[in-house]
Amino acid sequence: MPLNRRKSLTSDRPSAITRRDWLWHCGGGLGGIALSTLLQQEGLLAACQEKPIYHCKPKAKRVVQLFMAGGASHIDLFDFKPELIKRHGQPSQFGEHVEAFQDGLGPWLRPIWEFKPYGQSGKMLSDAVAPLGEVVDEIAFVHNVVGKTGVHSQGTLLQTTGFNRPGFPGMGCWVSYGLGSLNDHLPTFVVLPDHRGMPSNGSKNWDSAFLPADHQGTVIYPGQKTPIADLFPARQEPFLTGQSELATRELLKRLNQHHAQQRPEDERLQARIRSYELAANMQLAAPEALDVSKEPEHVLKMYGLDSIPSEYPKEINDAEETHLFARRCLVARRLLERGVRFVQVWSGNDNGFPRRNWDSHEDVKRDHGPLARAMARGAAALIKDLKQRGLLDDTIVFWTTEFGRMPSSQGGKGRDHNPYCFTNWLCGAGIRAGLTWGPSDEWGYKPLDRQHPTEVYDLHATILHLLGIDHEKLTFRHNGIDRRLTDVHGRVMHDLITE
């Protein structure tokens, strides 16, 4: 949702002020404008582009994506490899030339944590993600996911947009475009970044690109003093009164009517109007949705939020790490139950030391430990919470990362990037619970069946299928090409879902 304030209103000519500048100057970036209906009544809105129809009865209505930024190690969390324990410390031999991202082809490195079986499925999980054992029978693990690159920025874009270069809409944007909104007061696609900042590529991961601008992700920082930038007018502006607000709306109505008459084919005005209408509605709806203090005590305790600090120290410890990620998970649930279609929850973003992302080149135990425990506590609570409210029946929980880590060591205690094989997992609407799919080889280096790996296109196609959409028909004409989330690839993973 474009709510960014322009930094300058200067111009060589006093009359050259733009409409966007005037909007910010007079209304603080909002105004609660109700122009869509008025312009529609006067025939000034361009016809909406035809949306794809359901190709089957949808099992899911909404998606929450949990993204581990930096490259989470599948072999230390979910993909148990006894052979690495047996061969620990021996020279790594892959049987082929390996293009490592850095100098990460040291001796074989055993899993950092012990593994134990959990649930009726007996799924092996490491101690670092033990809380997921409570919900492991709800989850389908996919261990043979492959990427195309060991570069963070490209790998992240591939998982979020289906392309490893910028300029393409995020998955949440496609879901918003294809299905529309379930509510009138909150965005269709919401992004909850790590409390430390943005992941690789920043907003390109959730930008609408060539789709209409109102489908882009809206960034929210739960727990901060200003969770949503520019939602309310600046308090220091004394001219923002009720009377000036009404005058601004009337003037904007005339300006936009004139603008639309001159450019009936331009969809940007429509997107801008919808954006500001939504922002006005969010002034009431968003603060309530983000207020986790209203949750009952047993829910807060389940997430580990029964004591909520007013602020956090600069150096965040394990308990606070867990608290912050769990809070994003609880906010995600509150948004989903209020009609948000797609929520993206990020974990890890920090280039300092010790690392607070998943890019564990130096020390997997030090770097992964706090993040893994926080993720497992928050994700397990989210799944249990959705299930007890009946929301898991029509919500997909999708866990991913840009690539995995190598089974060989780097610098003794770290692991290099592994785009050749890693793990994703899903649960919820239409997903076969308690399933382990697509084994990796004995090292966790590549898929056991190298001819039939799982690609991100397959996961995206499957999620769209569960939402009732044929991924080949969800297209948008751009530069002479019918673009889609899955590019020219993708197969629905029918073995992964309940038909």
Image (cartoon, grey):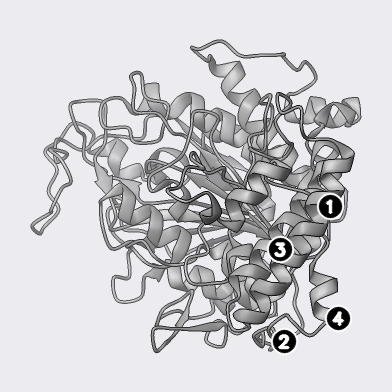
Number of marks in the image?
A: 4
Q: What kind of element bears circle 3?
A: helix
Residue type at the position of mark 3:
Ile
Please tell me the numbered disc located at residue 273: 3
Residue type at the position of mark 4:
Gln
Q: Which residue is mark 4?
A: 41
Residue type at the position of mark 1:
Arg
Q: Between disc 3 and disc 4, whose residue precedes?
A: 4
Q: Which residue is mark 2?
A: 56
Q: Between disc 4 and disc 2, whose residue precedes?
A: 4
Q: Residue at x 73, y 72 (%)?
A: 257
Q: Between disc 2 and disc 3, whose residue precedes?
A: 2
Question: For residue 166, which quarter of the picture?
Answer: bottom left
Say which quadrant the N terminus sits in: bottom right
Question: Counting other residues with Cα less than 10 Å from the Cα at mark 1, is it few (<14), some (14-19), or many (20 or more)?
Answer: some
Residue type at the position of mark 2:
Cys
Q: Position of residue 72 (x, y in %)?
A: 41, 42
CA distance separating discs 1 and 3: 22 Å
Mark closer to the observer (4, 2): 4
Q: Which residue is mark 1?
A: 338
On screen, residue 155 above or below 110: below
